[in-house]
Every structure is written in C-alpha cells, then in structure tokens.
C-alpha cells in the first residue's frame, strides 16, 4: 500500500508541476517582453503588474469557437495538439530535481536516450497538424518542421552524448552523481550546442521559420482555434521547461549548488532552470528570425562540427584522467 501511495504522490507532483511551470513561463514571457519592448497592455490587466493577463488569455481561448476545416482529416486534426503536448509530460516524469531517487518521478537507466527520443515524438504533433489541416500554408509549416527536426536532432544528441561519456553512464541521476565543477568549462561548447539545438526543435525565435507569421500565416497551426490552439502554446512552454531542465541536469550540475546544500538541491535545480528560461525569452526579443538556408547552414556547418569536437575533447580528457 505504501508503494501505491508513493507512486500516486509522485505522479500527482509531476502532473501539478507540468501544469504550473509552463504557465509561469508564459506569464514571465508576457512581463519580460513588456519590459524589454515597452509594451503597456500586459502590465495593466487586473491591476498590479498585470497579474491577470494569463487569466484573460485563458478565458479568451475558452470562449473561441472550435473550428475544424471542412476538408481536414478530422481525427488527425483533433489528435495533433495532444500528440504535441503529452511527450513533454513523460519527459518531466524522469528529470531528477534533487538528490536520490525520491526526487524524480521515475528513475530510468537510459534516461538520456529516453528523453531525447520522447522529445522527438512531440514534433509529430506539428507534422500531423500541418498535414491534416488541408491548408497549403499549414503543410508548408509542417514540412519546415520536419526539415528543422532532421537538422537539429543530430547535434543535440551528440552534445548529450559527450556528457554521458564524461560521466560513464546514460542515466540522468548517474550523470548528476558523477558531476564535477571542473566540467563546466570543459563541457561549455556542448552545452551551447544542446541549448541552441533545443531552441530550434521547439521552433522558438530566432528558429521559428515553421511558424513564420509574415510568410505562412502561422504555419502548421494556422487552422487551429480555441483550446486546441492553446494546447499548442502550452506544449511550447512545456518544451521550454523541459529544455531548460535537461540543460541544467546535463551541463550545470542540476541539484549541486556552490555551497553544497544538497538538502535544498531542488531549489538549485529550479533556479538554474528559471535562469535558462529567462535566456530563452531574452533571445526571442533580441534576435530576428533566421532564413531557412541560414537555419540549415548553422546546424550542418557549425553545430554538428562543434558537437563532434566536443566528443573528441571528452575522449581525450577521459584518457588523460585514466
């Protein structure tokens, strides 16, 4: 009975975190962009610092009519938002927040491979939406999504592999147990490659060619309205939480803090994740959208060679240490 209660509590905590953290990132994005760009609207909704902006957005999406195009593949069209969102819930389930197996929803031995594989499944939601909408702009957005996934999945995997080599394990908990502070300068290139490739897979600016509103309206999501469109937005913010959490675990030491307070390890994990989420928002405000050829060139001529160089460096360091 205690095992059942333990599993139930872990699932409940993970589910609550999955619902709350992406919404906090969305609310933070409203405020950060309002400050950086001088936007007045998001700062006034509800009074103090625009606290009700997120509530207003939720009511707006709930009130909108749920429209399915006449020529669309109805079942695939309706299923696509769930396919885009649910994989991130599975990834959150295996990200360790604190020391020990008690601070993770489910410990997975091949954690690195699991999270990267499941994150790739989330892209299928965009592909399904683009194909099922019976809209040429949506289909073009889906094709761009597929091309972007093919280009950036490889450097992301290679960067994660360098950390697994350094730790001698593909378990996320094992990587954190083996973490040493001198890894930070050694693995910094891999961290940058992983983070940039993750941004591209999430289609976040400046890698938002699949949803380029000035060219293809809103890409694969053009025909979506109401709560289904809101689910795609929630999937984007959940992806930000997952990407920042994985970057924290793989490259920034996760629960390890500068004063060795492992008892408060979850605080360090959340602080590092929040800082990276701020960087994601900052990049959206700062850099213009890349062209499709620039996007592909960045992956194949910059990120992939850097990731391979990081793996080579990791191999050399491991041999020297031994």
Image (cartoon, rainbow, N blue to C red):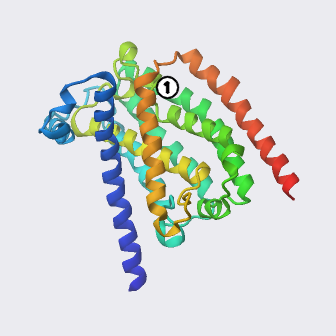
- The kind of secondary structure element at disc 1 is loop
**Residue nearest the observer in this picture, 237 or 119:** 237
* The one of 266 and 55 positioned closer to us in this rendering: 266
The reply to whether residue 62 is in sight is: no
The answer, for residue 315, to whether it is visible in the render is yes
Q: Which quarter of the picture shows residue 56?
A: top left
Residue 159: image location, x then y, percent: 67, 42
Q: Quadrant of the N terminus?
A: bottom left
Residue at point 57%, 35% (across, down): 197
Q: Position of residue 65 (x, y in %)?
A: 15, 33
Asked which quadrant contains residue 186, the reply is top right
Q: Is residue 250 above or below residue 72?
A: below
Residue shown at 45% from the left, 20% from the top = 140
The residue that appears at 30% across and 28% down in the rendered structure is: 35
Q: Most extreme residue toward the front, as rendered?
A: 259
In the displayed structure, does residue 263 sit left or right of residue 71?
right
Q: Residue 205, how many percent across, how many down?
A: 45, 26
Is 320 on the left-hand or right-hand side of 100? right
Above or below, 266 against 62 in this view is below
Q: Which residue is disc 1 drawn over?
A: 207
Q: Would residue 96 be found to the left or right of residue 34 on screen?
A: right
Specify the quadrant that holds the C terminus. Answer: bottom right
- Tell me: 256 left or right of 56: right
148 up-or-down from 268: above or below: above
- Residue 293, placed above or below residue 129: above
Residue ID at (61%, 36%)? 192
Marker count (numbered): 1
């Amino acid at each position: 009975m205690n095992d059942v209660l333990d599993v139930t509590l872990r699932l409940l905590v993970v589910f609550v975190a999955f619902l709350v953290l992406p919404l906090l990132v969305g609310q933070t994005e409203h405020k950060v962009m309002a400050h950086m760009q001088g936007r007045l609207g998001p700062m006034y909704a509800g009074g103090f610092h625009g606290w009700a902006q997120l509530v207003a957005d939720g009511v707006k999406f709930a009130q909108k009519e749920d429209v399915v195009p006449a020529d669309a593949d109805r079942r695939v069209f309706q299923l696509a938002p769930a396919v885009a969102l649910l994989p991130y819930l599975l990834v959150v389930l295996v990200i360790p927040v604190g020391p020990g197996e008690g601070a993770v929803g489910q410990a997975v031995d091949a954690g690195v491979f699991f999270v990267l594989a499941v994150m790739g499944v989330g892209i299928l939601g965009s592909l399904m939406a683009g194909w099922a909408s019976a809209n040429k702009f949506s289909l073009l957005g889906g094709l761009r999504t597929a091309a972007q996934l093919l280009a950036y999945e490889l450097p992301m995997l290679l960067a994660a592999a360098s950390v697994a080599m350094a730790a001698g394990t593909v378990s996320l908990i094992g990587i954190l147990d083996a973490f040493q502070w001198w890894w930070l300068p050694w693995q910094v290139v891999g961290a940058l490659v992983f983070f940039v490739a993750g941004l591209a897979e999430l289609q976040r600016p400046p890698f938002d060619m699949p949803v380029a509103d000035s060219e293809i309206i809103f890409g694969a999501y053009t025909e979506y309205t109401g709560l289904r469109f809101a689910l795609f937005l929630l999937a984007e913010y959940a992806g930000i939480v997952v990407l920042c959490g994985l970057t924290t675990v793989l490259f920034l030491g996760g629960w390890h803090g500068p004063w060795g307070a492992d008892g408060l390890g979850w605080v360090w994990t959340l602080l590092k994740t929040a800082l990276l989420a701020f960087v994601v928002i900052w990049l959206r405000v700062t850099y213009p959208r890349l062209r499709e050829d620039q996007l592909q060139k960045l992956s194949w001529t910059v990120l992939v060679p850097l990731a391979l160089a990081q793996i080579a460096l990791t191999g050399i360091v491991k041999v020297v240490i031994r």
